[in-house]
Image: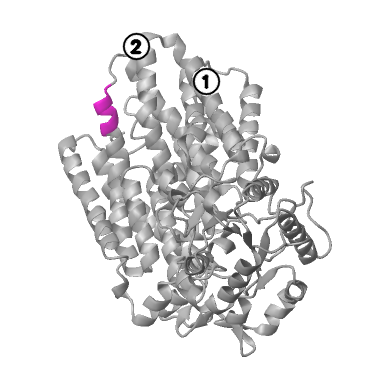
Amino acid sequence: MQDGRGSADSLQTEYRPDIDGLRAVAVLSVIAYHLMPKLLPGGYLGVDIFFVLSGYLITNVIYHEALGGKFSIARFYERRIRRIMPALLFLLIVVSTIAIALLLPIDLKGYAKSVFATLAFVANIYFWGDTGYFTQAAGEKPLLHVWSLGVEEQFYIIFPLLVVLCVRWRRSALLPLTSALVLLSLMANILADRVGEGGGAFYFLPTRAWELGSGALLVMAPSARIANFWVRHTLALLAAVFLIASLCFKEASLDGFVPTALWVVLGSTLAVYLGSTGGSWLTLGLSKSALVWVGLISYSLYLWHWPILVFTRYYFVQTSLSTVEAAMAVLLTFALATLSWRYVERPFRNRSMKIGTVLVWVACGCMVPAIASVAILAYHGLPSRFNEDTERIASAVRAEYGCSLNERIPFGALGACPMFLPSHNPADATVALLGNSHAQMYAPLVSDILRVNNEKGILVPLSGCRPMPDLNDSLKCMALAAKNLSAIEALPGIHVVIVATTWDPPMYTPTGEVPKGSGSQYLIESLDRLIKNLKQHGKTVVLIGPILPPDSDFASIVARQIAFRHKIDEPLFAPESTFIAKQGYVIAHYASRDDIVFIRPDRIQCNLARCDYIRDGESLFADDSHIVEAALRLFRPVFEPGLKQAFLLKNLPTGM
């Protein structure tokens, strides 16, 4: 490894150019996916190839050192520090500088938090709580990709000890124990993917360990040279088919019964196995010099490609790059990665640099982004970097209210948040606000009106799901909505139920079918059944009507266009006729009913024949559809009389 080839952890193992070739396939797949997802829909699975290779290479060192009685935890972590930290810290210092120059305050604060998570190798946990990997917001997180380093380093806190203890005390137990852990992790992945919330199967070590473990099993399992020519080359064909099919076709996972990553893990595991048992045409192909060179710089390539793409898209305020922009981004990525490999990775991995020197540099390298991040958080994202117009719009970015997990009290499917409920006991509530994030965003306004009228309330949130148990965004959403509805019906003290939802048609019936015909009609019929059910249980129903959302990340886009002196081409309003064409049927249906209270926030948003997205220089929207918490005061004139009417009606018979 003195020449910079191979793994930093493979000082005692024979260099394998085919493994660097497989690294190249992995990193190029990830880069291609992030540049043009449609070109390589499964390209993000390149990370799973890295996991298999890491499990194989590092276990190879640990296992053989343990067999020879030479394993040292200190030496193991010295190699990990030399391998991981210098290039990572170089990246953090450069990226932090650019982030301070470019990112809006809310984005910069999120970046600062991700720096701490990265330094602590818990970025996977941080991003699980912050954003999904495949969401639009993920494209504005410069350090999102380091989640994979978190998974790896967490794995290597535990796994080396397992190998060493088994080799020392009961070597025969290592293979069956590791196999059992791989199987358990695989089962956890399947379970979390089918029933879990928020991408836990994607981000967490317990659901990813089976991939690293698959590589580890190659080291532990007995192996012999495959003498038969046809067997070797047929297995190589199978490995290539698994890899190509996984990377080129999205969700090749047998309808969710096995993890999406299974095939790419099998393909890469088989490719590594063939390289150690006689080779094949695939081994020779992966050993080509061009692929080997890409593999050598793959760690730095992986580190640099994502921040470059994020900052480029962020500055030009676009979600995708043109062919020329993409080519320039790739060239810059390779240039920086080559420099990082040559002048950062190799010198620090060279044993001629003493570990004391390495640790001093690493400590100093950690302090720079850490201190910068402390300053960013202490000064609230440094808003003074931008002019007044930018700052005013930027303050709205993702500034809608959401019921956080630490606010929640046990109730229904996923808990509830108190709204002027000092006791924090749902049994004391008289009002419930029920719905998805479009119910949550109104909670501060509703809570204040409850306070003025001495009513106690709970917010029963279900982000990503409608409140209807018989028509929703998924079968899982229906089950969760049914639990929330049952919990509200079971509380006799709740007399008023405020229902709010998004108004684009949901997708699934209880049989899993997509409704045919008018989606709006199905939505209205389902809401009507929900209202009828609540009224049968003695509840007065308040329904919050639709607004016209911008359907783009409005505040962020406009703030960046102003900040970077781009032309403001984002529509600042839409014709009211657009709203009427889209929601006129819904408005007419519910405005004509006298058995519910129907609140119309569109009467505030829309006037003078247009529906505003911005008013008096302030954005009404925090993102593509949610109202900014600070702008809720504008909607009070339609909410307060409607809710007071409901409070007066709550003690009267509700009828059918």
**In magenta stretch: residue 620:** no
Q: Nearer the viewer, residue 17 or 507?
A: 507
**Is residue 108 among what the camera can see?**
yes
Q: Nearer the viewer, residue 70 or 540?
A: 540
Q: Position of residue 125 (x, y in %)?
A: 42, 44
Identify which amino acid the numbered label 2 is placed on.
Arg
Q: Nearer the viewer, residue 127 or 307?
A: 127
Name the outermost residue toward the right.
Answer: 517
Please indicate whether residue 68 sits to the left or right of residue 235 in the image: left
Q: Position of residue 373 (x, y in %)?
A: 28, 57
The residue depicted at 74 percent of the width and 78 percent of the height is 581
The residue depicted at 64 percent of the width and 75 percent of the height is 600
Q: Is 57 drawn above or below residue 222 in the view shown?
A: below
Magenta stretch prevailing secondary structure: helix
Q: Position of residue 346 (x, y in %)?
A: 28, 42
Q: Earlier in the sequence, mark 2 or mark 1?
A: 2
Per the model, the C-alpha gap separating discs 2 and 1 is 19 Å
The residue at which mark 2 appears reads as 168
Q: Is 34 drawn above or below residue 504 in the view shown?
A: above
Q: Nearer the viewer, residue 618 or 239?
A: 618
**Is residue 18 among what the camera can see?**
no
Which quadrant does the N terminus fall into?
top left
Residue count near mark 1 (Cα–Cα under 10 Å), binned few <14, some 14–19, many ≥20: some
Q: Which residues lie in the magenta part?
A: 72-78
Identify which amino acid the numbered label 1 is placed on.
Ser
Residue count near mark 2 (Cα–Cα under 10 Å), binned few <14, some 14–19, many ≥20: few
Which quadrant does the C terminus fall into?
bottom right
Q: Secondary structure at mark 1?
A: helix
Q: Is 428 drawn above or below residue 557 in the view shown?
A: above
The residue depicted at 65 percent of the width and 42 percent of the height is 245
The residue depicted at 41 percent of the width and 36 percent of the height is 152
Q: Which mark is residue 179?
A: 1
